[in-house]
Image (tube, helix red, strand yellow):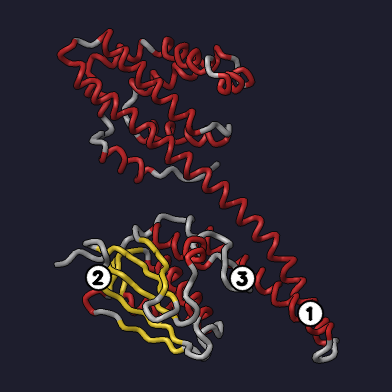
């Protein structure tokens, strides 16, 4: 896995745990006691997990125990002999990535850190004067907390990338036959008699093919949200909505729909990633436009204060049939749709974009019928 190591994020962890690259120096002469305990740690760690049936099977199938004990001893010695330099941060990160490659259960990795913490406290009790034990334990605990954060961050990042690569590969492989099928159906349609059963069948197949095309596009949008960390900057809601409206209108989804925007000037700016917020609003407008009442096709967008201090709210109302209680509970789940030709991904994509930008999305029946999608997003601090 040749992915860049997120040093900025790792340094953020160090800072918020009140550690710095030289933190191990805070152990002073006591570092030597931990360094000398490396071999004992390797043996203790292996014996602990050999006593658990599931992990014993893993240990006995891997490298020989003597080699594993040596690797663990080196890791433990390195933790207390090296400072948190960029080189050592890379070592910690890559060890977490290695856990993914080996398909290690992250729960057992975290259990391993609990074993390490107990072992370190044992070293402190035996080797550190009682007057200094509390301070030394505080530094050691924070060092181990940092290691857990790095291992967990690496695990989540790498597994997410593996999952995303798999999904992107499937979507790519599906896209090609969908295109071929669609082209051939259109060719056959031209040869069929207008209104004939054959043409009706081709129409049905083509609609399903188009739904698959939209689903592949929605899957790409969903996985694309995981490409980078979201930015946080002031975003003018009117500008975001216009870009989202243009995209939806260009696909004919607003034909015959009356769209009104009633933005509160005091709540017209949100903090978040501009591209992700446009995506969020794009899918919500598309969903609202598809759900409107045919006899009264209205969509209204409004903004106002959020239910939580420091947040603002965007509400998208549409006419039509109010969602049932079951729909409201299921519509934010992937692939659940109340529309015959829906992909079931629009609202989950919007909900994911909201969460990534520290907000939230909810759905409720409208006060006079229809539905309301509520999005809460962070607002810029007041001057």
- Name the residue that disc number 3 marks: 214
Seen in the image, is 161 located left or right of residue 146? right
Residue 173, percent from left and from top:
70, 59
Labels 1 & 2 near each other (Cβ < 8 A) = no
Disc 1 vs disc 3: which is toward the camera?
A: 1
Residue 101, percent from left and from top:
57, 35
Labels 2 & 3 near each other (Cβ < 8 A) = no
- Name the residue that disc number 1 marks: 202
Q: Between marks 1 and 3, how big is the CA–CA gap?
A: 18 Å
> Which dot marks residue 305?
2
Q: Earlier in the sequence, mark 1 or mark 3?
A: 1
Instruction: Give the residue at x 29% y 37%.
Output: 14
Instruction: Give the residue at x 44% y 31%.
Output: 91
Residue 178, percent from left and from top:
72, 68
Q: Secondary structure at mark 1?
A: helix
Q: Quadrant of the N terminus?
A: top right
Instruction: Give the residue at x 28% y 8%.
Output: 126
Residue 294, percent from left and from top:
53, 88
Q: Between marks 1 and 2, how big is the CA–CA gap?
A: 50 Å
Front residue (pair 90, 192): 192
Instruction: Give the residue at x 57% y 19%.
Output: 53
The image quadrant of residue 116 is: top left
Front residue (pair 233, 348): 348
Q: Residues within 10 Å of mark 3 (few under 14, many from 20)?
A: some
């Amino acid at each position: 896995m040749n992915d860049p190591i997120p040093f900025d994020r790792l340094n953020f962890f160090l800072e918020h745990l009140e550690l710095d690259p030289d933190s191990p120096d805070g152990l002073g002469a006591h570092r030597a006691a931990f360094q000398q305990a490396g071999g004992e740690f390797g043996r203790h760690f292996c014996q602990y997990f050999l006593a658990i049936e599931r992990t014993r099977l893993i240990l006995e199938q891997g490298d020989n125990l003597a080699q594993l004990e040596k690797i663990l001893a080196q890791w433990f010695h390195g933790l207390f002999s090296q400072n948190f330099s960029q080189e050592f941060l890379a070592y910690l990160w890559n060890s977490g990535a290695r856990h993914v490659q080996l398909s290690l259960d992250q729960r057992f990795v975290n259990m391993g850190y609990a074993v390490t913490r107990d072992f370190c406290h044992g070293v402190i009790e035996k080797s550190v004067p009682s007057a200094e034990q509390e301070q030394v334990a505080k530094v050691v605990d924070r060092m181990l907390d940092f290691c857990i954060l790095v291992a967990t961050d690496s695990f989540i990042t790498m597994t997410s990338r593996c999952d995303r690569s798999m999904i992107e590969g499937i979507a790519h492989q599906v896209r090609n036959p969908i295109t071929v099928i669609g082209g051939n159906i259109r060719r056959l349609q031209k040869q069929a008699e207008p209104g004939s059963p054959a043409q009706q069948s081709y129409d049905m197949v083509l609609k399903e093919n188009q739904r698959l095309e939209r689903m592949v596009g929605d899957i790409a949008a969903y996985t694309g949200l995981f490409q980078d960390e979201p930015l946080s900057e002031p975003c003018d809601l009117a500008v975001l909505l216009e870009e989202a409206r243009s995209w939806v209108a260009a696909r004919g989804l607003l034909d015959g729909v009356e769209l009104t925007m009633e933005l509160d000037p005091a709540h017209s700016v949100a903090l978040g990633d501009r591209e992700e917020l446009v995506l969020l609003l794009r899918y919500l407008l598309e969903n609202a436009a598809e759900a409107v009442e045919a006899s009264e096709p209205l969509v209204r967008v409004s903004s106002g204060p959020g239910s939580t201090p420091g947040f603002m709210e965007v509400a998208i109302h549409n006419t039509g049939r109010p969602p049932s209680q079951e729909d409201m509970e299921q519509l934010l789940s992937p692939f659940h749709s109340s529309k015959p030709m829906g992909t079931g991904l629009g609202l989950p994509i919007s909900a994911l974009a909201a969460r990534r930008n520290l907000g939230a999305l909810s759905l409720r029946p409208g006060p006079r019928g229809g539905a309301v999608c509520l999005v809460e997003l962070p607002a810029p601090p007041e001057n």
